[in-house]
Amino acid sequence: MSERPACATCGKSLEPAERGRPRRYCSRACQAKAYRSRRAETPADVPEDDDSAPHLTVERIVRAGIAIADAEGLDALSMRRVATDLGASTMSLYRHVSSKDDLVALMVEAALADVPLPDSAPRDWRHGLEAAAYRDWDLYHRHPWILPKVMVTTRAYFSPALAANSESAFSAFDGLGLEPADAFRYMFMFASYVQGVALTYVGDVEAERQSEVARASGTNASDRAQDPLFEPGAYPRLALAMRAGADPWDLDALFASGLAGVLDGIAADLARRGIDA
């Protein structure tokens, strides 16, 4: 004897339908309750029976979003673009990620997780900050879109991975007996330097991307030889300095040199205040 069907909402046994599709609910009240539940879990513009992309997962969607942002910048990211790259309908993405903002938040978490935190304590505060600086430098090279769109802001941006990254950097000051406000001041100066140089790198990435677009469209790129900076005698001090220190640009070397100067400044301030570091 076959088992009698049960209501999908309350579990009550159902009488078999005399004709048509099998019954799923014992009453209109249970049917309405199930509908409200689905509406609460699914965006309003997502068809309830959209099963066009059973291969989708949050991880695949996030990685596709990162790939787009890495290659073309965050402005190129959209739910439609991610869906196209994954061979899915746009609406099917909303079963896994509720909005573009949520997608970006998940992308930040995944990108930060790709740059592992140290598994041991630093030798001293300077070693700890150097490790944090190069960890972030690597992060911004891997994912340039993170810096200008997400991380350079005074507004609180809650991210478990970002909080863990910052907590690890602050641990460099352990044992110095610093007041929290002083630790924040040093960290602000340190992070401002790292992110400031990284913004130069990110700007270069975007400029190169635009140049490639211009070349592909047949537009001539600007000729630096026509820049007033390079006219004889126009800006003698600036021109000499730029040619000596930034022609060609070596951002890695400049980053290392500037970082040493920032850390020297922190060391001098600690010594001035009588803190044995």
Image (cartoon, rainbow, N blue to C red):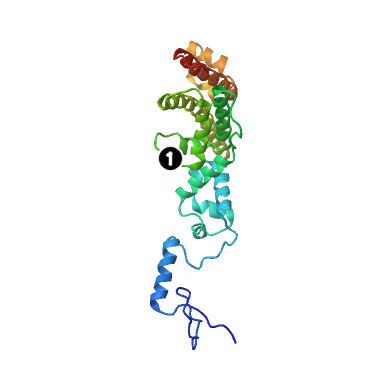
Query: In the current view of this chain or complex, which residue is farthest to the bottom?
Result: 18
Asked if residue 27 lies left or right of residue 55, the reply is left
**Element under disc 1:** loop
Instruction: Identify residue for label 1.
Output: 157
Asked if residue 248 lies left or right of residue 173, the reply is right
Quarter of the image with the N terminus in it = bottom right
How would you rate the neighbour count of disc 1 (Cα within 10 Å): few for under 14, some for 14-19, many for 20 or more? Answer: few
Report x, y in % for residue 176.
49, 22
Residue drawn at the location 45% of the way across and 61% of the way down: 41
Q: Decide which of 151, 69 is in the foreground and name it.
A: 151
Residue 254 visible within the image: yes
Q: Decide which of 126, 66 is in the foreground and name it.
A: 126
Report x, y in % for residue 262.
50, 19
Report x, y in % for residue 104.
49, 46
Residue drawn at the location 50% of the way across and 68% of the way down: 49
> Residue 3: which quarter of the image?
bottom right
Residue 45 visible within the image: no
> Relative to residue 271, is residue 162 depicted above or below?
below
> Residue 86: which quarter of the image?
bottom right
Residue type indicated by callout 1: Tyr
- Mark count: 1
> Relative to residue 199, is residue 58 depicted above or below?
below
Q: Decide which of 51, 174 is in the foreground and name it.
A: 174
> Relative to residue 105, is residue 151 depicted above or below?
above
Report x, y in % for residue 47.
47, 65
